[in-house]
């Protein structure tokens, strides 16, 4: 319902890039540039300053940005409220999830939710916790699921369930036969780590510091952005890592990996993160309730 020129301008202003806006809107860059030019002609003023390949909002652009956020938000809320009057459950649901949740937990939940509500079109963005939280904060996602505490004041966070992290290693590794492992016992081992910005990385680093071990003192042989890649490397016997117990359930059953509890235990939470003061549609609320119940059930089974 909202003016298309305003939608395009808002996306460019958020990304501060015509190229990134075009990718997000599934448009060509010339089409994006044309829409912004049309809006500038309508207001008879420039909305962006262009210099040395970069763009920035002009004072007029900043003012239009403030109103665009309100107008687009109200337009979205209006469409959702009117749709709810018909009693139907449908429409787009823009989700984001950190890697562990996206690869291991959400696919089953989304499949079950889609089977129950066929008219829902779920779109999932995968990234580390920091990336997902930022996307929620700039309203490009309706809802995020992350594995680390929130760091932004513009979002709300709601704990869903607990998840235990354990040390994983190959069955032939010398730590495999231990009943538990303390942080100091990890220092001498080759360590395969998640990338900076990962919720698992942040939480593990904090845990090690509390155990009087500096993360900088670890013998990190690799930093990988994929939990699946980490499991594959650890299976070769190259080193150890710290990962969700639930993520290695299959490998443990097949005898490919061993999960050794940490001492003290390392428990984190999975949480929903969403923009503060944003209208919560019936679809939003229903999915949160459904996903919360299923994640709590899966956590208890794990």
Image (cartoon, helix red, strand yellow):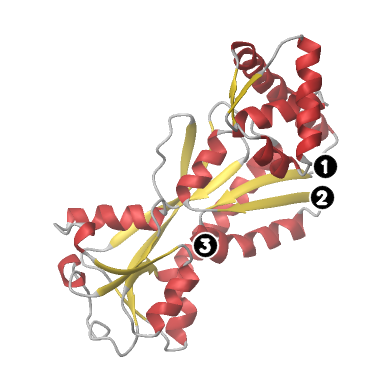
- Nearer the N terminus, badge 2 or badge 3? 2
Frontmost residue, 117 versus 141:
141
Per the rendering, the mark at residue 297 is 3
- The part of the image, by quadrant, that contains residue 252 is bottom left
In this figure, which residue is indicated by the disc labeled 1?
88
How much space separates mark 3 and mark 1, taking CA atoms? 27 Å
Alpha carbons under labels 1 and 2: distance apart: 8 Å
Q: Which of marks 1 and 2 is nearer the N terminus?
A: 1
Q: Which residue is drawn at 76% across and 30% down?
A: 33
C-alpha distance separating marks 2 and 3? 25 Å
Residue 128 position (above or below residue 90): below
> Percent from the top left, x then y, of residue 27?
79, 41
Q: Find out whether the residues at labels 1 and 2 contact each other: C-beta distance under 8 Å.
A: yes
Q: What residue is shown at x 21% (from left), y 73% (from top)?
A: 181
Q: In this view, does 89 lie to the left or right of 292?
A: right
Is residue 11 visible in the rendered structure shown here? yes
Earlier residue among tags 3 and 1? 1
Q: Going by the picture, which residue comes out furthest to the right? A: 86
Q: Tell me the residue at 23%/82% (across/down).
A: 175
Q: In this view, does 37 lie above or below 232?
A: above
Residue shown at the point (65%, 52%) measured from the top left: 124
Tag 3's secondary structure?
helix
- The residue tagged with tag 1: helix, strand or loop? loop
Q: Label 2: which residue?
A: 119
Q: Residues within 10 Å of mark 2 (few under 14, many from 20)?
A: few
């Amino acid at each position: 319902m909202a003016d298309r020129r305003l939608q395009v301008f808002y996306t460019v202003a958020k990304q501060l890039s015509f190229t990134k806006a075009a990718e997000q809107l599934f448009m060509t860059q010339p089409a994006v540039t044309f829409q912004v030019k049309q809006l500038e002609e309508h207001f008879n003023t420039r909305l962006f300053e262009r210099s040395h390949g970069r763009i920035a909002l002009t004072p007029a652009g900043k003012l239009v940005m403030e109103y665009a956020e309100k107008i687009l938000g109200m337009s979205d809320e209006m469409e959702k409220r009117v749709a709810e009057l018909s009693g139907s459950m449908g429409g787009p649901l823009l989700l984001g999830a950190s890697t562990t949740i996206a690869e291991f937990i959400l696919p089953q939940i989304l499949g079950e939710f889609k089977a129950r509500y066929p008219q829902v079109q779920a779109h999932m963005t995968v990234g580390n916790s920091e990336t997902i939280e930022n996307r929620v904060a700039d309203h490009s996602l309706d809802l995020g699921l992350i594995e680390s505490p929130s760091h932004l004041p513009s979002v709300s966070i709601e704990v869903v369930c607990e998840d235990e992290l354990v040390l994983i290693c190959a069955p032939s590794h010398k730590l495999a036969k231990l009943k538990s492992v303390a942080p100091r016992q990890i220092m001498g081992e080759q360590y395969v780590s998640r990338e900076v910005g990962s919720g698992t990385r942040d939480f593990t680093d904090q845990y090690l510091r509390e155990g009087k071990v500096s993360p900088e003192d670890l013998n990190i042989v690799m930093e990988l952005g994929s939990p699946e890649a980490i499991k594959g490397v650890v299976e070769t016997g190259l080193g150890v890592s710290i990962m969700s117990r639930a993520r290695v359930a299959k490998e443990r059953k097949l005898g490919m990996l061993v999960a050794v509890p940490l001492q003290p235990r390392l428990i984190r939470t999975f949480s929903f993160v969403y923009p503060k003061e944003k209208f919560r549609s019936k679809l939003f609320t229903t999915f949160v309730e459904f996903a919360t119940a299923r994640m709590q059930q899966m956590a208890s089974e794990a």
